[in-house]
Image: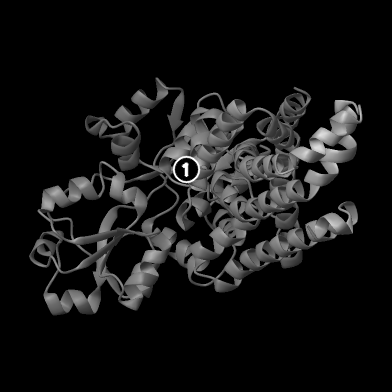
Amino acid sequence: MKARLILLLLLITMGAGQVDARVVIGSKKFTEGIILGEILHQLAGARGVESEHRPELGGTRILWEAMLRNDIQAYAEYTGTLQFEILREPQAGNWDNLRRILEARGVGISRPLGFEDTYSLGIKRKVAQKLRIQRMSDLAQFPQLRYGLSHEFLERKDGWPGLSARYGISGVSVRGVDHDIAYRGIESGAIDVIDLYTTDAEIAHYDLIALKDDLGFFPGYQALFVYRLDCDPGLIKALGEVAGKINESQMIEMNADVKLRGRSVEIVAQEFLRNELNVNSTIQLQTFPQTIASRTWEHLLLVLLPLLAGILFSVPLGYLTSRNSFAGGIILAATGMLQTIPSLALLVFMIPLLGIGTLPALVALFLYSLLPIVRGTHLGFSSISESIRESATSLGLSEWFQLRRIYWPLALRSILTGIKTSAVINVGVATLGALVGAGGYGQTILQGIRLDDTTLILSGAIPAAAMSLIVQGLFDVLEKAVVSRGLRQV
């Protein structure tokens, strides 16, 4: 009971730490959305609205649900996505209809930003010329082509299921691939056809052609911002300033600056505001060491807080499993079942309950920490021989004395092994917390994948691996300090 109370207080404290008076602007896990989110963030700041930008929060549904929960107050979206993926109302076609339907749900939309970013299918120019493919209708004649499509596109109503039916594309090889990785796949020749965003800078960079949607399957995808109607009025006013100010060529150029030329999102957004809106925004760029230090602190919190809660919760449970076979079977089965849930799925399951940010990641990591500690504790206590138990009882020792001075020292090595295993697992799984805005080394890894920057990927992956080794080393030292030499040799 005490352990549960401590856990509850920990979770309340973690959740309370997320409460902030600032406006939170989110962005999807692709470069264009991050640039637009940063433009709004800097513009809001220049207009006196204190805001925070949380980039790379995942796909459409995660951002939409986060806004409905008031975890974020605004993000960049597209009319076709609102129409088909979010509202699932194809008849909601024009901007006025969308605005009316969304306002009934407490959501507003800005005027279009001035460009359209439409879905298309892309193929290498030399392949298209060789096969004489110019339109999507032509693809049905070449079932041997290999498709690498983004996971969201594979599921969307305005994505692959409807597109393949409209164009009669069947019997082809289709695999789900991260959008950014797909470009590397088509460049290497591993795949032949990918889905594109028509403002992607990589289209020209990799010499691809966007096939003509000759049957008119895709709706219009005008870029705009969606926001909560109850958000800061200053933010709503800032949204109006961006409307109609970004054309397609400007957006492609900004995407290229970030994705291909390695310029920071913050500087690209700042230059746009200065050149197009005559707004001088201020930015604070972290140095590389500062970024690593910040990510390390975030990652440590993601590992240590769930581990501490897991120890307080799991050790008593593990002891109970060793004393009561019926309850033990239930507890071991339940914690084992939690361990079988894929970590990414568990994080996504947490979003409707806890929103985005640090809290859902902490709870998911806590749940993952249970099984190794429960099993280690169960093994430690249940492996104590019956003769030792009988001897302790025959000497008239109290149960508390037996537990504290005999059973606990004998079980400690196994308990520490379970805790060490849990800690190492948490170090790795914590990198996925970045997908729900929890930060840590995963944020750097995601950024590196998006920008095709191996250095960035390694600057997140290597410290995570080093932290895992350090954790193992610290527990080895701890075991030598608290477990007697004789018991370590058993």
Q: Position of residue 34 (x, y in %)?
A: 52, 52
Answer with left or right where residue 273 lies relative to residue 131.
right
Answer with left or right where residue 8 lies relative to residue 100.
right
Q: Is residue 417 above or below residue 1?
A: below
Q: Position of residue 208 (x, y in %)?
A: 29, 71
Residue closest to the eye, 353 or 395:
395
Residue closest to the eye, 81 or 454:
454
Q: Position of residue 489 (x, y in %)?
A: 81, 61
Secondary structure, mark 1, is helix
Answer with left or right where residue 149 lies relative to residue 225.
left
Could you tell me the amino acid type at mark 1? Ala
Q: Report the number of numbered marks.
A: 1
Determine the residue located farthest toward the top in the rendered image.
104
Identify which residue is drawn at 14% across, 70% down.
133
Identify which residue is drawn at 16% across, 52% down.
164
Q: Position of residue 328 (x, y in %)?
A: 61, 31
Where residue 85 sits, quadrant-wise, is top left
How packed is label 1: few (under 14 Cα within 10 Å), some, or many (20 or more)? few
Residue 19 seen in render: no
Snapshot colouring: one colour
- Quadrant position of the N terminus in the picture: top right
Identify which residue is drawn at 66% across, 62% down.
464
Residue closest to the eye, 266 or 420:
420
Q: Which residue is mark 1?
A: 345
- Quadrant position of the C terminus in the picture: bottom right
